[in-house]
Amino acid sequence: MTLSIKLSLGDLGKSAPIVIGYTCSREGSPITLVASASTFTSKEEAWLVKALTNSQAVGKSDEVRSLTNPDGQLIVAVAIPQKSDLEGLRRAAGVASRALLGQKGATFAIACKDGDEFKAVTEGAALGAYHFHQFKGAEKLPTSLSKIGFIPGRAIKSAAASIKRTEILVEQIRFSRDLINMPPSYLTPEKFVALAKAALPASVRASVKTHVQLKSEGYGGITAVGQGSANPPRLLHLSYKPAKAKKKFAFVGKGITFDTGGLALKPAQGMEAMKSDMSGAAAVISAINAIAHLKLPVAIDAWAPLAENMVSESATRPSDVITIYGGKTVEVLNPDAEGRLILADALVRAAEVTKGLDGIIDVATLTGAQIVALGKRTAAVMGNDDAFREEFLHAARAAGESFWPMPLPEELRPSLDSPVADLANIGERMGGMLVAGLFLREFVPADLPWLHLDIAGPSFNEDQPHGYTPVGGVGFAIRSLVHFAEVTSAG
């Protein structure tokens, strides 16, 4: 599993590389170092500025330069855009960590003005240090940063608490990334459950429904999606209930451990990325773990419906009618629109189990239409309560994750009508992301605040690494869910 990373205040010593920032107002303009006071002498600063200038540094986002000073110490200088915000600092620190592959430790001496900037630097540095090694031969394993020291440049109130929070949060994001990156032959629904249970804090309780229980108890969505696979489905339920909870939320995450499309078989090109179709489930279990470790006064029930969508003689056929938990029937016109089926079961159960919920949030790599609409780095938010949605969006912005509000147009709802069932699992093709949201809304009580997060684009990076984001699993939505729990329980 993931390698732990230790964060601390202070210099790791002259043997460890040191990380600083720099800015340029425009190409060709003088370079200004963004380094903590007393890190360098004036002579050393002059040498660094000259070396960066000679390297043709221009201060663009994700720009990094590795230099060796006259004493032989490695100095990693990362560009901080002139109009950089907290996310810019987080990205810059992540770029520096990625440039330090092969090093065991480093000191980050990027000057921070306040606690918010310090938190952004610590998060970015820790997130950027991730590498997935589990399935590589021992002789091919590169060294990863396992220890990072920070010199913020001024006294930061609650710096130690900030570092501890970052360690907890990042460790869970790294765990989520590991799950997403695992090959589907290894991460079956049953293995997902085993790994999740092994990683639980003592304050989180787990229960699991087997495929036999799911079928006998009427979970028609999870059963239908998983029945074509030799690896049977599961429903994992995690519960964190502090003594004095100020709020109660349910998180539901889509857990398709591999998606072939079923009898609506996907093209071979790109199918390898479908191991990431359980990113929503990874996000919700990692979020509840972080919330529990942080001992936040908010009760969370996390639900992970888990299945493989495979092709076989027992796979669900187009035009089959299934019964979702709770009694609604669905005509399965497209077996590749399977995520909404397993989520429907879990949404109904989540609302049934926990009375007095303040809201329910589902997280899913649900539609390719989300990527068409918003690209690969911005997720969509839909829901039935504007105030609840805005509260989440405010928390997501503060956490540094990109979400955009999307509507649920009523004129698209009739496209889900079926002549043989209560509704069909697909409708109007144009606006497919919104239609999927409308489908899920059918399984949530109208008076229960609900949000649907479609994270199909930003959950898995198939392009080049950027900022603190590696290739592969991203662990998207965890920071937003955790910060949402923090701010809603603090009020």
Image (tube, rainbow, N blue to C red):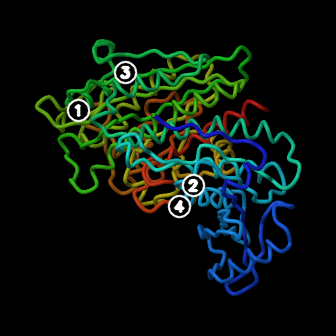
Task: Identify the residue at image location x=76%, y=50%.
Answer: 11
> On screen, 210 above or below 247?
above
Tell whether 356 sits left or right of 86: left
Q: In x, y percent, where is residue 467?
A: 57, 59
Looking at the figure, which quarter contains the C terminus? Answer: top right
Residue situated in front as seen by the camera: 348 or 399: 399
Q: Which residue is mark 3?
A: 325
N-term-proximal mark, 1 vs 2? 1
Place residue 429 in its image quadrant: bottom left
Q: Which residue is mark 2?
A: 468
Alpha-carbon span between mark 2 and mark 4: 6 Å
Q: CA distance from mark 1 to mark 4?
A: 48 Å
Q: Nearer the viewer, mark 3 or mark 1?
A: 3
Q: Nearer the viewer, mark 1 or mark 2?
A: 2
Question: Could you tell me how far apart the alpha carbons at marks 3 and 1 are, in whole angstroms?
Answer: 18 Å
Q: Which residue is mark 1?
A: 420
Q: Tag 3 or tag 4, which sits nearer the N-term?
A: 3
* Labels 1 and 4: the sequence-earlier one: 1
- Give the mark nearer the N terminus: 3 vs 1: 3
Report whether 220 appears left or right of 441. left
Disc 3 marks a residue whose amino acid type is Tyr
Q: Residues within 10 Å of mark 3 (few under 14, many from 20)?
A: many
> Depth-wise, is mark 1 or mark 4 nearer the camera?
4
Find residue 466 and name its label: 4
Q: What is the crowding at mark 2: few (fewer than 14 residues within 10 Å), some, or many (at least 20)?
A: many
Crowding at dot 1, Cα within 10 Å, few <14 / some 14-19 / many 20+, comes out as few
Alpha-carbon span between mark 1 and mark 2: 49 Å
4 and 3 marks in contact (CB < 8 Å):
no
Residue 9 visible to an observer of this rendering = yes
Q: Residue 64: image x %, image y %?
A: 61, 68
